[in-house]
Amino acid sequence: MRVFPVQMPSGGRYWTVLDDELEVVPVADRYLRELRFGRDRAESTTKAYAGGVALFVRWCARTGRDWRTAAADMGLFMTWLKYTPTGDDRVVLGPGAVPARSEGRINRVLVAVRGFLSFAVANKEVPQWVLGQLYELADARALPLEAQGEDGGLSHRLRARHRLSEPETAVDRARDEEIVALLSACRSARDRLIVLLLARVGLRRSEVAGLRRSDLHLLPDNRSVGCEVRGAHLHVVRRDNINGAWAKSRRSHSAPTDFLVVRAIDQYVAEREQCPAAADCDFLLVNLFREPLGGPVTPDAINELFGALSVRAGLARAVSPHMCRHAFGSNLADSGAALDEIQHLMRHASPSSSQPYLHPDPSRLRAAVDRVPTPRALVEGISR
């Protein structure tokens, strides 16, 4: 089983699942198409879900199970995921070995599989009882009256049966000194701007690659360009971009920019003007040093840039674009930003996505303790 990209006649792309004979798995293909075009999910999401579905169908084939009814053995599938190395399912790791996949990775695969099988149930490709193997089903009328809602009608609550407990870990952020080192290793104004858009605005790499020049509103009062948002900012807009960039949120957002980003934009615009091929391209970030000159930078090119910058800066670890975004969220929390502010600036759909950034660093915990007043009577009592 493998995943494979598909481009529609309209230009839209999604990922599907092929079997060992390189034939499309029909139900998986319909599910992934609906996910991409019916539910308006990103192409990268279909790639991740296709990978999870492919693992499930492969496990079923290797163990002689029918994927339509294999949900009854989901616990065994989780064990297989944990101890079977990626790319070689003929090997099973022994006792004491480091698991092949983390708890978080296994949980993400399970999300994809539950979505796939639920779609198959809804389309009568799979027996109805499979849903009960995936979820704990309960009648909402069993709840207290206060929690049932006003209509009092029959409804069901679904809770996933299979999920591993993930260890609580700190947000994997780029440290401030690492960001400074990355900036020092940049060889162009464009590359410095990319680092700052991630680390000072908190954009995702696809959001960076998808920016258009028309998304920049850098005046103190932007009403002259038809925008009511005051102060320098940029707009994050979901579009079908030719470079594969895709904003995660369906809703457009405005993101404030500080003086460092505005200055970096000015320097980059002057650099970009030296490339005549970029004159007619509305994308903000374009290729200046490699073919196709003047074409939009791709999200994968941003990954390559950070790999090269990490080596050039002599960092002890490779810093990814998303680690710079995490640095932005962590710095917001450390500066005292409220949860709703972090949620809006990070463009999170749910406050729970912003919650991990509220874990303060040790220095801020120390400062919080030092701010607690010490009553004189308490000091005198200890001195005796």
Image (tube, rainbow, N blue to C red):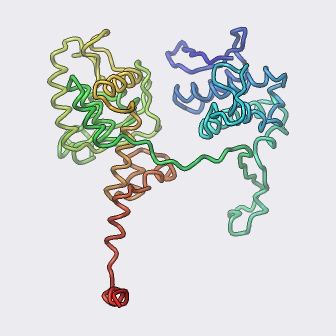
In the rendered view, does 214 fall on the left or right side of 338? left
In the rendered view, does 195 fall on the left or right side of 339? left
The image shows residue 177, relative to residue 142, as above or below, that is above
The image shows residue 232, relative to residue 207, as above or below, that is below
**In terms of image quadrants, where is residue 131?**
top right
Q: Position of residue 329 (x, y in %)?
A: 38, 47
Q: Position of residue 165 (x, y in %)?
A: 64, 48
The image shows residue 192, relative to residue 360, as above or below, that is above
Q: Which residue sits at x=65%, y=25%?
A: 85
Q: Which residue sits at x=75%, y=58%?
A: 140
Query: Of 111 and 238, which appears nearest the observer?
Result: 111
**In terms of image quadrants, where is residue 328?**
top left
* Figure quadrant of the C terminus: bottom left
Outermost residue, front side: 384
The image shows residue 45, relative to residue 61, as above or below, that is below
Query: Of 27 and 376, which appears nearest the observer?
Result: 376
Q: Which residue sits at x=19%, y=14%?
A: 275
* Figure quadrant of the N terminus: top right
Q: Position of residue 53 (x, y in %)?
A: 68, 27
In the rendered view, does 299 fall on the left or right side of 88? left
- Tag count: 0
Q: Position of residue 149 (x, y in %)?
A: 68, 63
Q: Which residue sits at x=38%, y=62%?
A: 365
Query: Of 71 and 365, which appears nearest the observer?
Result: 365
**In terms of image quadrants, where is residue 120?**
top right
